[in-house]
Amino acid sequence: MRYYVTSPIYYVNDKPHIGHAYTSVACDIIARFQRLSGKEVMFMTGTDEHGQKIQKSAANAGIDPQEFVDKVSRNFSELADKADISYDIFLRTTSEGHKKCVKYVWSELVKGGYIYLGKYAGWYSFRDEAFYQESELDGDRLAPSGSTVEWLEEPCYFFALSKWQKPLLDFYAKNPDFVKPISRYNEVISFVKSGLQDLAVSRKSITWGIAVPGDDSQVIYVWLDALMSYISSLRMFDEGKNAKAFWPADVHVVGKDILRFHAVYWPIFLMALGLKPPKQIMAHGWWTNEGVKMSKSLNNTIDPMDLIQDYGTDYLRYFLFREISFGEDGNFSKESFISRINNELNNKVGNLCQRVLSFIFNKCDGRLQVDHDSNELLQSANNLLENMQKHMRNFALHLMLDSIINLADQANKYMEENAPWILIKTDKKSAERVLFTLVEVIRYIAISLQPFLPKSASEILGQLGLSKEQTSFSCLNEKFALRSFKINALPTPVFTKIC
Ligand code: MSP
């Protein structure tokens, strides 16, 4: 079974911030989860390097746009590497393969009769690289995203979007799970029901973009260019490539601000090209910083590289998917970050592993030999995979993590109630049974934590002495229960407290 997941491709007008890391980590959790479930996964991320915004940033920096995007794009690939993003493809829209694909697509859309020359007269948001209708602007003439708009009047090519209203609504009706969460889907549906206007798909007044085939005076609209990255990355139209094997994408993960491009324009472009729309789009919420919207002008964006440097990748990943429900907005605060790491990750998971494993090393000569057991705690561990799968179907990544932490909670309680440190004095066999149950639960926890905390999970799995084949999700059941256990050295704590 194949699985294709994509992150948005990031604008390279500035260095990455925590919102970018959030989207990428979400995709990474999904990709790792599917790989551990035995699927052949393709995970694409990359950078969006054309358009007016980038052209201006390069001009402000006083350097050639290509040199500028080369430099900033590197910041994003470095972040992906530092944040343990296990991407298969890092696509740049300035790459030759991508440009070729976009030009081909343009010609196909022209051939299909979907593109015509006209004149745009309306509002344009430079920050969103988006066209807005008068009715969408508020009293202060701001776009729904809060960005300012400018009046734009220029000849350009249009895509006949309006013709697609009915086919798109029919598609929505047949695919009730197309957009998650459902509340956002409803907003999209009502937007489409209110009527679609033809979309300007080229710009005359800018130069930094892919030239319209046959008309060098225009460049292709940056969103048409960017969306095609999801198929150019697969080399969809290259001869001899089996790119279609991964299409349609299983999920595009996007922030709520760019849902319209993905849930309205993108399926229409694909249908016009004779391709299937993606199976699902997951739109997540936005982070604020200590309660305030993050923005360059307020100079309050959070640099994920700083957090990784100070606390390590796994702590950042844990916080991002523990603090807020995936899909909702949320707030970043240092206090909450520290509390989540110290009071949960350390006190719950860290303590459990450290107490159990060091006790076995110190008091049981580092070895346990017990027959298969069954009890309520092991039963909960056995249900973990099913719970996680259920939550994954809704992209409730926070609930998946929640079920792992709950299991650690239960295991700590079980340890307190059964007090192996007392039991061992009178009934060694029973103490060993208790410890064995706990080792088993740690095994479940470590395997399940892999998509979220790849480094820490792998350390715990190493302490348990498990080989690579013993760490896939197919081992999350009693058939793969350990038959004996041996630990050769006093374990060093995988988690440490922060301040
Ligand atoms: N280049 C377009 C995407 C093209 S995809 C074909 C773009 N780039 S972006 O760099 O501005 O944003 C990329 C992602 O970061 C979006 O999903 C956006 O929602 C996310 N975030 C940007 N700021 C954010 C927060 N403050 N919080 C959470 N995510 C945010 O849009």
Image (cartoon, rainbow, N blue to C red):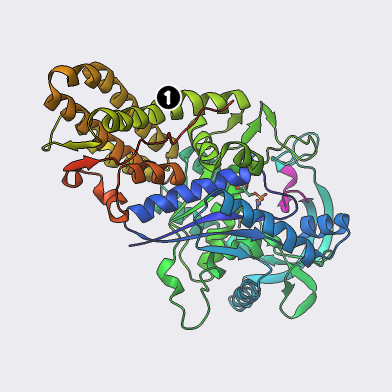
Q: Is residue 129 magenta?
A: yes
Asked whether residue 394 is in view, the answer is no
Residue sitting at 46 percent across and 45 percent down? 455
Answer left or right for 221 relative to 387: right
Q: Amino acid at mark 1?
A: Asn
**Residue to which mark 1 is pinned:** 347
Magenta highlight range: 125-135
Name the quadrant of the N terminus: bottom left
- Return the x and y of residue 380 as percentages of the image width and height: 24, 32
- Return the x and y of residue 229 as percentages of the image width and height: 59, 64
- Return the x and y of residue 489 as percentages of the image width and height: 34, 39
Q: In the picture, residue 487 is in which quadrant? A: top left
Q: Is residue 149 magenta?
A: no
Answer left or right for 384 relative to 25: left
Q: Give the secondary structure at mark 1.
A: helix
Q: In the picture, residue 376 is in which quadrant? A: top left
State the residue in front, 181 or 346: 346
Q: In the picture, residue 257 is in which quadrant? A: top right
Q: How many marks?
A: 1
Asked whether residue 434 is in view, the answer is yes
Residue sitting at 35 percent across and 34 percent down? 404
